[in-house]
Image (spheres, rainbow, N blue to C red):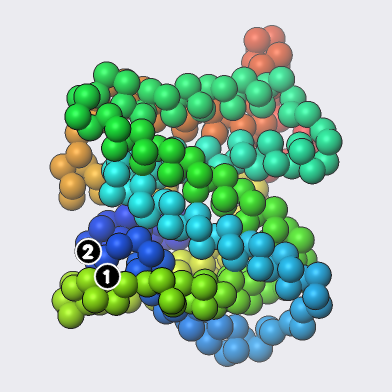
Amino acid sequence: MVAAMSLSGTIGLFVLSSGQPPLTVVFFRCLIGSMALLAWLELRGGWQPMNRRALGWLGLGAAALIVNWLCLFSAYRLSSVSVATVVYHVQPFFLILLAALVQKEAPSPSRLVWMGLAFVGVLLISGLGAAAESGAGMWMGVALALAAAFLYAVATLATRKLSGIPPAQIAGLQLLLGVLALAPLADFSHGLDSGRSWSSLLVLGLVHTGLMYNLMYAAFQRLSAGMIASLSFVYPAVAILVDVVYFKIVLGPLQMLGIVLILAAVVANQRGWNLTALKAGLPQPSRSGKQ
């Protein structure tokens, strides 16, 4: 899980290093990643037949996943890798809202408070107190990262409907649909003769998709939900480190406060912290055990 999350935190570095437009990057990630995942599935012999209903959910998940990547990769360029990554981590709250709409069940008051705290963090990280000339780009990047988070929540809900289907089959077929959808739109003339571009795209497809997905799926089968939630924060930590060390990004105090608020809210939500119990000093329930 640590290896998978560390790789996730470096995705933005390779997206920007490729020098390609987001649509072209997503196309090649889909192309290379789908081949890697489906080849792995074929080697493992785990292919499962899918009915028409499953194919419908697969298509919805594919559309949400691919547009999610387009939004997130665009956000990297407009804000920064760390800002886009941290804002993207509000996705559990979108998942709560979508599940509430589908299941007609309102979130608990504590979850609403954590959700509000996270979105206060989004406002702070968006550039309040930042230079006026960079404000518009920062806001657009944050808006795209929020859109990516919402779409990932949609993809998650769609994937949950595909029980009994190997994860590599789901992801591989979704990426294959992305290849078919993006092939007519991708720009293949934007400096693709560069070795740096090709190496970055190959790493994104083979390492950040084929290898990383298999690492994550293996981790999900071996770890408790609480441990998975805790280790997920390696992802934004590495993304922030990449921004500071490689891109020399310096965030303002309000933006750093926003990052802390978002991550604190996501931790509280994932651990199931209850405000009433916190106030009374009672032990908190954990997602990794019985509540």
Tell me the element at label 1: helix
Measuring 30% from the left and 32% from the top, which residue is drawn there? 136
Q: Check the image and report above or below for 236 versus 185.
A: above
The one of 283 and 52 positioned closer to us in this rendering: 52
Left or right, residue 13 beside residue 264: left
| Residue 168 x, y percent position in the rendering | 60, 74
Q: What residue type is labelled 2?
A: Gly
Q: Check the image and report above or below for 192 versus 230.
A: below
Q: What residue type is labelled 1?
A: Ser
The extreme top residue here reads 280
Q: Check the image and report above or below for 146 versus 7.
A: above
The one of 226 and 138 positioned closer to us in this rendering: 138
Give the residue at mark 1: 200
Measuring 46% from the left and 72% from the top, which residue is drawn there? 182
The one of 234 and 127 positioned closer to us in this rendering: 127
Give the residue at mark 2: 19
User: Which label is found at residue 121?
Assistant: none
Choose mark 2 or mark 1, whichever is in front.
2
Residue 272 in view: yes
Contact (Cβ within 8 Å) of mark 2 with mark 1: yes
Count of numbered circles on the image: 2
